[in-house]
Amino acid sequence: MGNFISDKRRGEIGEQIVANILKASYPKGDIVKSKGRINWDFAVDEGRTENSTLYFEVKYDEMARDTGNICFEVSNGAKLTGIFASETNFVFYIIPTKTANTYEVFKMDRLKLVKWLNESPELTRAVNGGDKKKFSLLLVKKEVLLSAIEKLGTYLTWVEKE
């Protein structure tokens, strides 16, 4: 847990990692970082078809390194939040490791992930957290998510150059 400044800095680290991954994955794509509070962090358009833009959301989960739980935000009261409210195609979850500048990266199809979370209550733990514990969250053990990653997306270890 941190304050706004440290949380913002960690989010910026996650976004830089994803920007580098997208540049490597889509070398001919036009990569755009969102400005302001939009429902996505990055958009990539490879220009192949009229509607070929892909949208990506970035989540940075530092606590997962120590707890082994990946946290998915579900709602604030009756209002869906996080990946449950997002309109992106993909979500990146970035988890720092204990090795400097090394991160675990989960890139998942957002709709498949939401469906999996909804259909797998036995694999999740529901908790409340965030400001005044107003947010409903789902915790998933990292090993459980890894065992399902082939259905949901990809996993890699990323070393960020300084």
Image: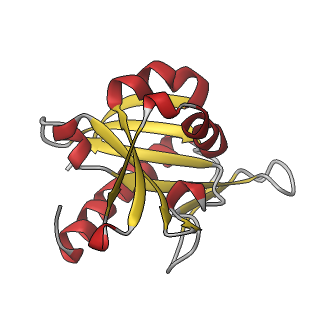
Choose between 123 and 154: the one closer to the eye: 123
Number of marks: 0
Q: Tell me if residue 91 can be seen.
A: yes
Above/below status of 40 relative to 137: below
Location of the N terminus (image quadrant): bottom left
Question: Residue 129 placed where, x, y %?
Answer: 31, 61
Q: In the visual, does 141 lie left or right of 118?
A: left
Choose between 107 and 20: the one closer to the eye: 107
Question: Residue 29 placed where, x, y %?
Answer: 64, 51
User: Coloured how?
Assistant: secondary structure
Give the residue displayed 61% in from the left and 33% down from the top. Answer: 119
Q: Tell me if residue 161 can be seen.
A: no
Give the residue displayed 64% in from the left and 47% down from the top. Answer: 28
Question: Residue 3 placed where, x, y %?
Answer: 18, 73
Choose between 37 and 142: the one closer to the eye: 142
Choose between 4 and 55: the one closer to the eye: 4
Give the residue displayed 50% in from the left and 60% down from the top. Answer: 82
Question: Residue 130 placed where, x, y %?
Answer: 31, 66
Above/below status of 40 relative to 157: below
Q: Quadrant of residue 21?
A: top left
Residue at the bottom extreme, as displayed: 36
Q: Quadrant of residue 67?
A: top left
Give the residue displayed 25% in from the left and 61% down from the top. Answer: 10
Q: In the visual, does 93 lie left or right of 117?
A: left
Q: In the visual, does 66 lie left or right of 76?
A: left
Residue at the right extreme, as displayed: 50
Above/below status of 52 relative to 21: below
Q: In the visual, does 23 lie left or right of 8?
A: right
